[in-house]
Structures are given as structure tokens and as C-alpha cells.
Image (tube, grey):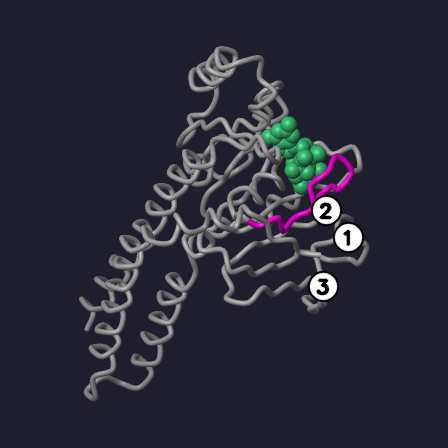
Amino acid sequence: MIETSARETRNDEDTGDAAGTSDLVRAALRMIDEAESLVSGPARPEAAQRRDRSRLAVLRRLFSRPPVFVLAGEFNSGKSSLCNLISGIDALPTDFLATTSVPTHLYYAEVSALAGFTHADERLALDGVPALVEEPLSCIRAGFPAEVLRRFELIDTPGLADPDAHDGEAVLGRIRADAVIWCTPTTQAWKESELAAWMKFPARLRQATVLALTFSDLAAGESQLARVKARLEREAGPFRATVAVASRPGHESGREELMEVCRMQAEDVVLQRIERAATILHRMLRAL
Ligand SMILES: Nc1nc2c(ncn2[C@@H]2O[C@H](COP(=O)(O)OP(=O)(O)OP(=O)(O)O)[C@@H](O)[C@H]2O)c(=O)[nH]1
Ligand SMILES: [Mg+2]
């Protein structure tokens, strides 16, 4: 069952400030529309028009979805709990035993929608995110009316170094994302094995990584937390930011700071998309 909770009310604060980014996206889409009318001039050969229109359709798709953050880290590092905290919905099972076994993509939908996809891309209806996936699913897609998911989507992943042998690293390699939230537990932060796994990400994703120091409620006071954070900022990364968070119900903290950093990272992704679109449009229109 998908449970909604008091956390949902927190989404209110996430609604208003998406305007900056969506203004940019709207402007980019207008630019693409204008380019379409220019490339569709009657004097141009039909084949050239078709080719340019299909390129413009690819560009439009670039702006049809918000940036995607993948939550990565070792097993039991608090990834699913953090997904729930960010989205404000207790969508994902979190337990020392409820191991995430397939990537779960959370996106905005006006009405909640949940589906599993097999490796042959067959769609299976689900009535909740299962704690243990028995069908041979390759991923789960879960839509929720959580405003924050309009600004960026989240993919929860199987943990790395899992003794139950979910091949987390292979799964991570197949995921298409724009940015990373790497979860590392405060009490055992940033092990060699994490560094090794993170280094396998392409540079583009390493540069777009936010390090979430999870389980910060278990730190022995603020000073230990500050020490761990300072050590990581000095010795690990470089990351976009290092943010201490706690997702334990009733002891949550750090969500606002994490959201702010993720919003800025998501805006950077949108700006990069606009730059890419502008370069392609410029080339296309110069050739007219
Ligand atoms: N005290 C505390 N417990 C947490 C926190 N985050 C998660 N937990 C607990 O730690 C356990 C594991 O959390 P999950 O969110 O399932 O961890 P995960 O990384 O998704 O685990 P896998 O899917 O197995 O890789 C659960 O019992 C959570 O309730 C936190 O910030 N503080
Ligand atoms: Mg999990």
C-alpha cells in the first residue's frame, strides 16, 4: 500500500518557486516553435523539412521532463527513506530487511499511478511498491501528486555492496540520470568502496553529485557532525554540496538545505539543456 502522511503538507512550500525554471523552459519551447516555422518554409525541399522537424522533436523532448536525480549508495544507507523525505510521501518501503531490489522512478502525476516493467518492457500493474520484488522486473515507475517531483524526479536504487547480491553497480550503470544524491551514513561515512563505485560514474554525474550525510541523528552531537562534514568537504568529492540529513520519522532534519541544493542543481541541468538546444538551433538556422 502507498501511504501518504503528514509529510505531504510540506509540499506546499515547494510549489511556488518553480517559476524561474519553467519560465526558461517556456522560452526554450517558444524558440523551438519559432525555429519550426522557419524550417518549414515552402521554398525548402520536403526531405530537409522532415529532417529538421524530427531534430526539433528531439529537442522538445529534452524539455518535456524535469531533471532526474538518482539516489545511490551502499545498502541500508538510507536511500529509500531519503526519497520518502524529499517527496513527502511514504511511497517506498524502508526497513533493514526491505531491500530495494529494482530501480524505482518517482515522477509527478496528478493521480497516483504505479507500474512495474519487465526486462521485455511488459507493463505489470502493482498496487504498492513491493518490499521484495519477486517478478523479474527491471524497474518500477511511480507517479505521485507531490509538487517537488515537478521540479525534479527521483530514482531510488538497489544498494551497492549488498550481501543479498542485487547487482547494484550494474543497475546504476544502466540508469539515465542528470544528477546524483549519494547517501553515506554519518557514522561510517565515505568508505573506500563508495569512492570506488562513485568514480565509475561519468564525470558529468560526479560533478552533479550532492553528498547526503544520512543518519545524522546518530552522530554524537553537533560537533561530531560538523567534524565529519568538514573532513568530507576536505577529503572527498569534490561534490556540489555536502548536507547532513536525518530521515527517521519524528527526528527528521536537513530537508530544507538538501532541497535548496537540489533545486540549484536542477536549475543548472535545465540551463545546460537550454545551452545545448541553443547550439543546435543556431546550427540549424544558419544552414537555412
Ligand atoms: N536513525 C535513522 N534511521 C534511518 C535513517 N534513514 C534510514 N533509517 C533506517 O535505516 C534502515 C534502512 O533504511 P532504507 O531507507 O531502507 O535504506 P536503503 O539505503 O534504501 O536500503 P537498501 O534499499 O537495502 O539499499 C531503515 O530501518 C530506516 O528506517 C536516518 O536518517 N536515521
Ligand atoms: Mg532502499
Q: Which residue is mark 3?
A: 126
Q: Nearer the viewer, residue 132 or 168?
A: 132
Predominant secondary structure, magenta span: loop
Badge 1: few (under 14), some or many (20 or more) residues near its Cα, within 10 Å? some
Q: Tags 1 and 2 in contact by the CB under 8 Å rule?
A: yes
Kindly indicate the quadrant of the structure image that contains residue 120.
bottom right
- Say which residue appears at 49% left-offset and 55% top-offset: 146
- Could you tell whether 104 is left or right of 130 in the image? left
Q: Which residues are magenta?
A: 89-101
| Residue bearing mark 2 | 101
Residue 135 vertical position relative to residue 216 in the rendered view, above or below: below
Mark-to-mark CA distance, 2 and 3: 15 Å
**In the rendering, at what x and y percent does residue 34 appear?**
21, 73
In the rendered image, which quarter contains the N terminus? bottom right
- At a point 53% along the width and 44% down the height, the residue shown is 70
Give the amino acid at mark 3: Leu
First in sequence, mark 1 or 2: give its number: 2
Residue under label 1, please give it. 133
The secondary element bearing badge 2 is classed as loop
Question: Is 76 displayed left or right of 198 in the figure?
Answer: right
Q: Nearer the viewer, mark 1 or mark 3?
A: 3
166 falls in the magenta region: no
Amino acid type indicated by mark 2: Ser
| Percent of width and height locating residue 274 | 29, 55
User: Splitting the image into four quadrants, where does ligand 1 fall?
Assistant: top right
Q: Position of residue 15 (x, y in %)?
A: 38, 54
What residue is rendered at 25% in x and 58% in y? 278
Q: Is residue 158 above or below residue 239?
A: below
Q: In this picture, is 230 found above or below 103?
A: above
